[in-house]
Image (cartoon, grey):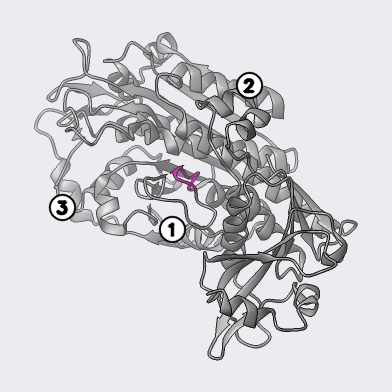
Amino acid sequence: MTALTLSTAAAPGLRADAIVIGVAKNAKGLVVAPGAEAVDKAYDGRLAGVLETLGATGAEGEVTKLPAPSGFKAPVVVAVGLGSEPEKDAGFDAEALRRAAGVAARALAGAKKAAFALPITEAADAGVVGEGVLLGAYSFDAYKESGRQGQDAAKAKNGKAPLAEAALLGGKPRDKAYKAAIERAAAVSEELNRARDLVNTPPNELDPEAFAAVAQAAAKEHGIKVQVLDEKALTKGGYGGILGVGAGSAAGPRLVKLSYTSSKATKSLAFVGKGITYDSGGISLKPAGHNETMKCDMAGAAAVFAAVVAAARLGLEVNVTGWLALAENMPSGSATRPGDVLRMYSGKTVEVLNTDAEGRLVLADALWAASQEKPDAIIDVATLTGAMMLALGSRTYGVMANDDAFRAAVHEAAEEVGEPAWPMPLPEHLRKGMDSATADIANMGERMGGGLVAGLFLREFVGEGITWAHLDIAGPAFNEGGPFGYTPKGGTGTAVRTLVRVAELTAAGDLG
């Protein structure tokens, strides 16, 4: 993991492999962002012109490298685009800083140390820049020769290890607010990156039992109580949804409960995550071309796991319980069939019309289990429907809820931390489509509005009077394209920061 430090050193005298500065664009052309005054001065105030000559425009995500001025101990200056210059007296948007830092960190893979001279005027700026660096520097190479043999081998093979250290210039090492911001950035980013690792891990290495073992180890490390229900316990408890989904796999299902408690807490939250460690579709087998990335179908559980651990590391004054509903959805002679009826943990019966609509089945059991503890609010997170991807694309997730104010608060928290989200309705007329002549409810309804139908199904398993929100992260959970900003190819860790922010706001009494 990249080390973060705060530094009051001047850019010219700092020993580093590179100095990172920000540039932006306005009506007159390119401008050098605050924080890089010493660098600009060394170019006799003509740095913007030099960069324009090299083709720089200041657009977000753009990186321009040039030799450092004479007298600098760092050999290279890296100019990263921040987008449009803000209006007078307004600072740069937090997400613009976060993305710029991420782009620069990724561009500096292989470097031992880089100094970030981006606009940092307050502790919050240091936090978002630090977060961008840590998220942008992420790489997953555990299954490559370089990753197995370590960084020295990576260099010998012409590979590039992640940036080793980032010094944030303009930071105040002795200031409590700055130190707290950096510590928060490290805790949240490290756990988010752990969620990315889980999503990227091949399904033959991460089945439900293995995922549960990871959760148990982390819980022990951070003082979190953990309970794991195996097949025997799930059968005894009547968790028909989780058992039904996992019935076709040689790897048995698990329900993991993680409990972080604070002695000062007055509120409690429950986070519920869909953890399908591999989704073949079951008997309703997915068509060719739709299976290759289905290791990511446990991204909701990974996000919940990471958020609970982050809350514990931050010592938030709120009780947070995470429920990881883990199963592998496979076709076999013992698999649940279309037409089967499952008796859920709540006692309701569900007619399974499509075994590829399995996420809602495991979530239903976990939601009911979470409801029994009467938390102040429940949020579930799931790569639930392709319909949500069709509606919102690959970078935005949907937010549904049984309370409009809570939905708005969760949406606002997501936008605040830089996770694009959009509020979605739960139209009552779509509920009728899940009526079943055989069972209490079917796991499928109308095709149109399928993401909303799934939300309505989940609502059936939330305890009466409990505030609940559903995050369908099917689009942004796994990036099949190239990296952008601080987002890598592969697992993204979507929703971790939203959940942590909701927990922080709840602890402070400021949610909604």
Q: Mark 3 points at which residue?
A: 448
Q: Name the residue under label 1.
A: 407
Locate residue 172 relative to residue 293 in the image: left or right.
right
Residue 174 covered by magenta stretch: no
Q: Which of marks 1 and 3 is nearer the N terminus?
A: 1
> Residue 119, relative to residue 218: is it above or below?
below
Alpha carbon distance from label 2 to label 3: 42 Å
Q: In terms of secondary structure, where does tag 1 sit?
A: helix
Report the amino acid beneath label 2.
Ala
For residue 493: magenta?
yes
Tell me the quarter of the picture where residue 31 sits. bottom right
Which of the pair 273/233 is nearer the observer?
Answer: 273
For label 2, the SS is helix
For label 1, the crowd category at 10 Å Cα-Cα, with few meaning under 14, some 14 to 19 and many 20 or more, is many
Q: Residue furthest left?
A: 437
Label 2 belongs to which residue? Answer: 217
- The amino acid on which the numbered mark 3 sits, given as a three-letter code, is Met
Q: Main secondary structure of the magenta part?
A: loop
- Give the magenta range: 488-494
Q: Which dot, 1 or 2, sits closer to the camera?
A: 2
As displayed, is residue 430 above or below residue 331? below
Viewport quadrant of the C terminus: bottom right
